[in-house]
Amino acid sequence: MGEHERSCETLAGSRRAAGEAGDLFCIVRFKAEREIDLNNREHDLRPGERAVAAPAPTDASLTFVGVIRTPWTDRAQCPRQGSPDGPVCVIEVFPPWVEALDGVDGRERLEVLYWLHESRRDLVAQSPRGGVVRGTFSIRSPVRPNPIGTAIVRLVRLEGAILHVRGLDCLDGTPLLDLKPDRSLFGAPAPDETSSGR
Amino acid sequence: MGEHERSCETLAGSRRAAGEAGDLFCIVRFKAEREIDLNNREHDLRPGERAVAAPAPTDASLTFVGVIRTPWTDRAQCPRQGSPDGPVCVIEVFPPWVEALDGVDGRERLEVLYWLHESRRDLVAQSPRGGVVRGTFSIRSPVRPNPIGTAIVRLVRLEGAILHVRGLDCLDGTPLLDLKPDRSLFGAPAPDETSSGR
């Protein structure tokens, strides 16, 4: 875990220096894909939980476009859900995607998508804190077939490749997948905000 | 496109029959990863749009957990944004994930994540319908470094592996990535609904 954060920091730093750095992706990929050690007691099945033989995740692939900095370095510390009044967290966007931030500073609320890099992916029934056992799709636990987290955040300010936001609940070092303007801000979206443009 | 829909229907059908079918993932993967033909005029850059040399998307990988059925078979037909009063669409969940739907029928609103399989991924500045040119992260266009769509839908009913919902705006045959209860339904989430459980 600490390992992973350090590697993300290294990655971010190196990217700032390198501008672009294809082979550094391997570091994060290694961490993201191989770090889950099911022998770690924290991944043990709790009473009533059910794992399945999950197919290999080979249908589509992701690129990490940044890294998220939060005050939480252990999952037990993370808030249950982000709050618009929560602490200011930092989202750092990597090259070559910084130019894609053009216009974001005009947005009050953003939707953030991120990769829940610590999650096992094979549970269909779970009880994250030993509570009621529920189907994975009926709860927002990070343990999912595709561990993608979504949050609505309030943009505090944008400085170059760095966004300061409130409303996150994820671990420090969480890889960033996407940023979008919050859909709830759209009444009748302008044509160039359509979700069916291409 | 029609190609892709048929392959998704075949996939869904075969999975229903087979229960599980690892090698069928290859079909969808082939379609999802290789279908984008940048020589297709519909992918041409419009005035002011900027593409970058995007790194290979090798940081993490996805598994398609179902397929989405909508009335829209061409991107020009898709609504600009889903409406809670929109047509009833169907989400089919594939094995082995059907058991993960346990408890979903108690949810009025769901967050749906899906793979925008027709999108190029290398634009940082774009104008989906020839309007104002904006940074990719400042609009909800399907063209993104990680083309993941999110929608909030109203659950009409759940029948086995099939969900009937209102509020989608995506193409027929869109691959499903995840289903979660809508975060806005959470006041103080119960412990087993935490997003920091593992």
Image (cartoon, coloured by chain):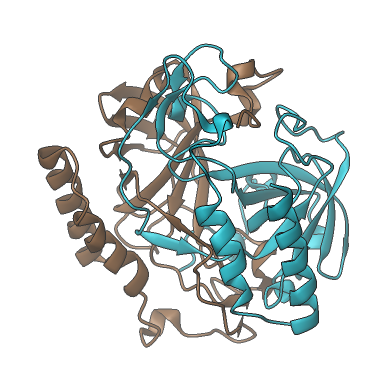
Chain colours: A cyan, B brown
Q: Residue furthest left?
A: B17
Image check: A55 left or right of A169? left
Instruction: Please tell me whether residue A84 is drawn above or below residue A97 in the rendered image.
Output: above
Q: Quadrant of residue A154?
A: top right
Q: State which quarter of the image contains the N terminus of chain B.
A: bottom left
Image check: A19 left or right of B13? right
Instruction: Please tell me whether residue B52 is drawn above or below residue B85 in the rendered image.
Output: below
Compare residues A13 and A149 and report the one nearer the observer: A13
Q: How many marks?
A: 0
Q: Position of residue B109 (x, y in %)?
A: 51, 27
At x 82%, y 59%, the residue is A106
Q: Quadrant of residue A87?
A: top right
Q: Position of residue A132 (x, y in %)?
A: 51, 11
Q: Position of residue B184 (x, y in %)?
A: 64, 28
Image check: B109 left or right of B93? right
At x 76%, y 58%, the residue is A6
The reply to whether residue B157 is in sight is yes
Image check: B44 left or right of A23? left
Q: Position of residue B164 (x, y in %)?
A: 33, 30
Instruction: Please tell me whether residue A134 is drawn above or below residue A5 in the rendered image.
Output: above
The reply to whether residue A184 is in sight is no
At x 19%, y 59%, the residue is B7
Q: State which quarter of the image contains the C terminus of chain B.
A: top right
Instruction: Please tell me whether residue A34 is drawn above or below residue B106 in the rendered image.
Output: below
